[in-house]
Amino acid sequence: MTKTDFEEILNKACELLTLEARSTGFKTSAHFENRVREVLDEITKNDGSFQIDFNPHPQAFPDIAMGEYGVEVKFTLNDTWRSIANSVLETQRIDEVKHIYVVFGKMGGVPEVRWGEYEQSVIHVRTSHVPRFEIELPSEKAEIKESLFQQMGICYDDFRKLDMQEKMKYIRAYARKIHPDGRLWWVEDKEDSDEHTTPIQARLYTNLSAEEKTRLRAEAALLCPSIVKSGRSRNKYDDMVLYLLTYHGVLCHQARDLFSAGSVANPKNDDEGGIYIERALKLIENEMKLAAFSMDDALFVEYWGESVPPEKRIQRWLEKADELATDWIPSNSLFIDG
């Protein structure tokens, strides 16, 4: 099978999936990925050169292997063609795959499914627990962006074969280029560790506008229900602080400022008492609901370990919070309006 032949298969698959997206729709990334797998299997059922695996390793890259061709599936409920992608490490890379494509399902705006070449679609690298790529398919109105690998001066196939120490040299050089005048944060080179952080341009949480502080607190609270733990619990804010730093470049040097400070939990400075974290969360319930419907499903898979439909994320958060809280029951006082 030639690349042209495979790309024609992708054309057919995206056409069928777009029709389905506009008629019945897709609610979760897991649902969409499974349908991509089923549609590709149906289109290629007479090709005996490969067999699509319907029970792959959950961290396999790419998601779907079809002989020497592979498909990485991306999905969003928002009106964007940009998404967090796989880890730079690629520890579960499927070696047989030589050519990788992206099939992207966009449910926001006018639902549509498109494909693109993986190497050309990777346009940025950002931090998580380890560096992760970011992909973007060009919209009809947008200019095609220079890929990350073009910016780094190395092709994807050569880059992926490097060890992590060598990969980080390219990533740091790229970061210096895009933030020549910014204050960059670095993780020291560790020869025996695969965990690194890409440089980012940091902002102090205390310098943000009130509106941005509220939005970021809502996102972080939703992803990290561990904040409802007892005030005596150590590290209850660690995941939140790391989320703000790695995904937004925001440094909060006093984690208490996020929820436990009186200015946050008790802005009216009354004397009603109560549990500060409970009061702080009640003040941002609406923002947490908005975050539940707008945040990328990949974030919930990363932080919760599961894909949850947007309309069920608040309920799932309450279930998690109830399991973690010891001094109170979050579901008895939060989001009680349904």
Image (tube, rainbow, N blue to C red):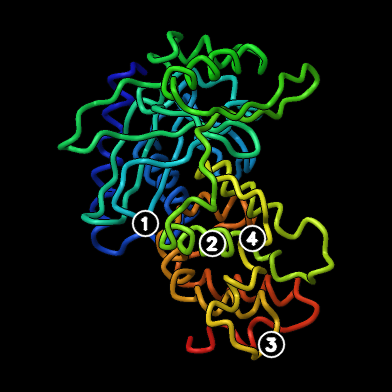
Residue drawn at the location 25% of the way across and 33% of the way down? 138
Whole-Å distance between the Cαs marked 2 and 4?
Answer: 10 Å
| Disc number lying in front (2 or 1) | 2
Can you identify the residue that label 3 sits on?
A: 273
| Disc number lying in front (3 or 2) | 3
Seen from the viewer's position, the closer of residues 252 and 4 is 252
Mark 3 neighbour class, 10 Å CA radius: few under 14, some 14 to 19, many 20 or more: few
First reached walking from the N terminus: tag 2 or tag 4: 2
First reached walking from the N terminus: tag 3 or tag 2: 2
Q: Secondary structure at mark 4?
A: loop
Residue drawn at the location 41% of the way across and 23% of the way down? 178
First reached walking from the N terminus: tag 1 or tag 3: 1
| Disc number lying in front (1 or 4) | 4
Left or right for 49, reference 87: left
How far across and down, in percent of the image, does residue 267 sit? 54, 77
First reached walking from the N terminus: tag 3 or tag 4: 4
Residue drawn at the location 34% of the way across and 39% of the way down? 43
Mark 2 neighbour class, 10 Å CA radius: few under 14, some 14 to 19, many 20 or more: many
